[in-house]
Image: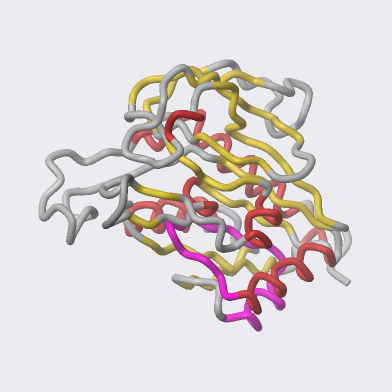
Amino acid sequence: MSEAETHPPRVNCVFVCGGVWHDIDFARLELLKLLAEDPAIRTRVFEDYENIAAIEAADILVTYTCDVTPSLKAQEALRAWLERGGRWYALHGTNSVLRLLADGPNAGLWEAPRWAPLMMDLLGSQFISHPPIAPYTVTVADPDHPLTQGIEPFETTDELYHLECHGQLHVLLETECVEEGTGFVEAADAPGTHPVLYIKDHGKGAVLYNTLGHCRGHYDLQPMLDWWPTVDRCAWDLPVFHELLRRGIGWLKQRPTLD
């Protein structure tokens, strides 16, 4: 037995988890527990992307954020890291840029400004809106891919993301949206088929994007709302979501050797 088989190589992971309107504490803990299932994965946790040296030294990247936009310097570092062979598992609101409009005809609505085109090109999509949280069915677009092989269509109660897509995506899971978004400037464009899980390649590397995984606790809408009456776990309550997360982590570890 070789040394690599008896002593698997260390996998350096950067985990960016931060932002607003979500129970970031819950998501951080759940994802760290999944990453810790493999003792070879050693994880550094940050709230944003600005520790560029850490990203450049990482083998794999996991992100769960909402309205956290990297600086242009960090975006360029992410692009170079992907081109060299980095693999990135991006979850839920990683592709969001949100601003609540205070004036004009759309006052009181959320907009998705196109302020980070490089970031959204890297991710392959930008969040635009979602209808009210309600049950919807996720179907399998590519049943032969290892990430989705054996996964059956399933129902989840989550935020159904309306996405503006960028570049060529290998869609693995998708859903049909039949309702307009609510509270968003571009809500009327929501109906249609939208990716739920997809891969976008970049050079020797790639991004795996999973839109599922909304979570919110009592205090997570402050300062807009002092107390949210429910604790929302959405897809986190489903075994199939945890299976998709574990498969995604396995996919990360299959990365090529970084140049």
Does the segment drawn in magenta span residue 58? yes
Which residues make up the magenta segment?
51-71
Q: Which quarter shows the C terminus?
A: bottom right
Q: Does the magenta segment cover residue 25?
A: no
205 and 30: which is toward the camera: 205
Residue 148: quarter of image: top right
Residue at horizontal 46 percent and vertical 54 percent from the top: 33
Q: Is residue 138 above or below residue 183?
A: above
Q: Nearer the viewer, residue 194 or 197?
A: 194
Considering every residue shown, the one lying at the far front of the view is 104
Q: Position of residue 202 (x, y in %)?
A: 81, 55
All told, the count of numbered labels is 0
Residue 249 picture location, percent across and down: 63, 49
Q: Quadrant of residue 157?
A: top left
Residue at position x 51%, y 45% in the image:
127
Instruction: Identify the residue at horizontal 14%, vertical 52% (top origin).
Output: 225
Q: How is the image coloured?
A: secondary structure
Q: Is the N terminus in the top left, top right, bottom left or bottom right quadrant?
A: bottom right
Q: Position of residue 90 (x, y in %)?
A: 58, 51
| Left or right of 128 on screen, residue 100 | left
133, 30: nearer the viewer = 133
Above-or-below relation of 128 to 152:
below
Q: Position of residue 154 (x, y in %)?
A: 50, 18
Please indicate whether residue 114 sits to the left or right of residue 4 in the image.
Answer: left
Q: Is residue 204 above or below residue 72?
A: above
